[in-house]
Image: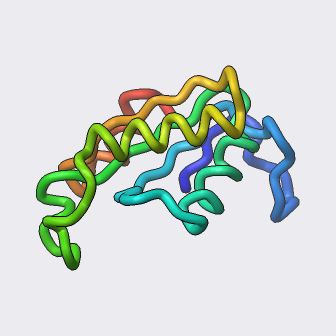
Amino acid sequence: MAISDDNLGHNSPFSLPNSYGSVVLGGTFDRLHNGHFQFLKPAAVVARDRVVVGVYDGPMLAKKKYANLIEPIEQRMKHVEDYIKSVKPGIVVQVEPIVDPNALQSMMRIWRL
């Protein structure tokens, strides 16, 4: 999980709610389960303004076991957005497909994170 804010100089290993302007993370997010919730919920809690999520698709799934059984990208993206909004209503959630291994870094540059 990449975290962006002007106040990165704190020494605490734990982040307080609303500590960062934006939080960026990525994954396949197929059939959301407790492991996904443990990844997404803290992102929503520490984000003050928005959470940006890249959801892997296309060539990014080529080497995954049982890739043919992965839910459609639209469904996975909606489930991620709905879950984050259920954790923190009112937060801006940007969910984008990632088909290129360098896309998450590109997203961070585009959104100036």
Q: Position of residue 84 (x, y in %)?
A: 60, 39
Q: Image quadrant for the N terminus?
A: bottom right
Q: Position of residue 73 (x, y in %)?
A: 26, 44
**Residue 15 located left or right of residue 109:** right
Label total for image: 0
Q: Position of residue 90 (x, y in %)?
A: 68, 21
**Residue 33 located left or right of residue 101:** right
Residue at the spot 36% in from the left edge and 46% down from the top edge: 76
Residue at the spot 37% in from the left edge and 40% down from the top edge: 77
Quadrant in the picture for residue 48: top right
Residue at the spot 20% in from the left edge and 65% down from the top edge: 69
What colour scheme was applied to this rendering of the protein?
rainbow
Q: Position of residue 30 (x, y in %)?
A: 36, 59
Residue 58 vertical placement versus 53 (above, below): below
**Residue 68 located left or right of residue 84:** left
**Residue 76 located left or right of residue 112:** left
Work out which residue is located at the far bottom of the displayed protein and give it. 65
Q: Depth check: give the residue in front, 55 or 15.
A: 55
Q: Depth check: give the residue in front, 80 or 104.
A: 80
Residue 90 vertical placement versus 110 (above, below): above
Quadrant in the picture for residue 60: bottom left
Residue 82 vertical placement versus 102 (above, below): above
